[in-house]
Image (spheres, grey):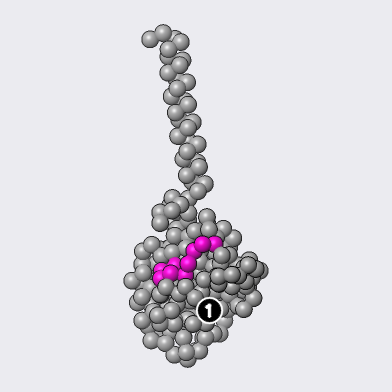
């Protein structure tokens, strides 16, 4: 093979490599993080949706990276509605949190069964670390039609991709008095042992509000 032909072949090979590298980098940039919520009743894997809820996902991952959720409790069970967790590591002690984040409820994601969303107070921009998993299609928690100011609804920021059976087992634990929401307190403690960031997956791989 002539030197010129060899050079052309080498240039073509480099070009292919560069294109493949750029495509790979673009895919990584558009990937969605997946976390494992390790509980005393099993593991729940959740795919987060940064594409639709960037501020909410980054806020949640900040708490995860800080270990905020490790050793906390599922402190609310509302059968047929939600299970909720976040900052309580006992019936009376809530861990310190960062400043609240803006509400991202109008992001096109609905509070369907198996989705994860941020709990908040009556102030729409009051979500910090508390989150819930929907046990049913709770579309009443979505942003209300005609809400031009964006002050209604609860921001969905991901979905359970495996471990919904664990969620359902947690939801079946007997509840009673105690905790921050009397009447919804699990009578058998359910601990979030750790939340782990697993990896990234390609984007698109598919009552009273919590407060």
Residue at 53 percent of width and 58 percent of height: 52
Q: Residues within 10 Å of mark 1 (few under 14, many from 20)?
A: some
- Residue 9's place in the image compared with 138, above or below, is above
The answer to which of 66 and 161 lies nearer the viewer is 161
Range of residues picked out in magenta: 107-115
Q: Is residue 148 magenta?
A: no
Q: Residue at x 53, y 79 (%)?
A: 209
Q: Determine if the magenta segment contains residue 113.
A: yes
Name the spot of residue 152 as percent of width and height, x first.
59, 73
Q: Which residue is mark 1?
A: 209
Q: Secondary structure at mark 1?
A: loop
Residue 189 visible in the picture:
no
Choose between 76 and 141: the one closer to the eye: 141
Image quadrant in which you'd find residue 6: top left
Q: Position of residue 76 (x, y in %)?
A: 47, 81
Q: Residue at x 36, y 64 (%)?
A: 162
Which residue sits at x=56%, y=78%?
211
Q: Main secondary structure of the magenta part?
A: loop
> Relative to residue 145, is residue 74 drawn left or right?
left
């Amino acid at each position: 093979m002539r030197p010129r032909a060899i050079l052309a072949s080498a240039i073509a090979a480099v070009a292919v490599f560069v294109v493949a590298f750029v495509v790979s980098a673009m895919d990584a940039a558009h990937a969605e993080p997946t976390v494992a919520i390790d509980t005393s009743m099993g593991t729940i894997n959740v795919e987060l949706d940064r594409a639709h809820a960037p501020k909410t996902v980054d806020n949640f991952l900040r708490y995860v990276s800080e270990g905020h959720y490790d050793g906390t409790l599922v402190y609310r069970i509302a059968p047929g509605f939600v299970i909720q967790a976040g900052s309580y590591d006992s019936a009376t002690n809530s861990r310190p949190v960062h400043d609240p984040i803006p509400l991202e409820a109008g992001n096109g994601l609905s509070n369907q069964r198996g989705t994860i969303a941020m709990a908040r107070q009556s102030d729409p921009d009051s979500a910090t670390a508390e989150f819930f998993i929907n046990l049913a299609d709770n579309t009443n928690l979505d942003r209300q039609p005609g809400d031009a100011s964006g002050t209604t609804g609860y921001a969905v920021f991901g979905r359970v991709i495996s471990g919904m059976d664990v969620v359902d087992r947690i939801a079946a634990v007997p509840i009673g008095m105690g905790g921050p929401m009397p009447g919804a307190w699990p009578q058998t403690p359910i601990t979030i042992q750790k939340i782990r960031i697993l990896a990234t997956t390609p984007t698109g791989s598919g009552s009273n509000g919590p407060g």
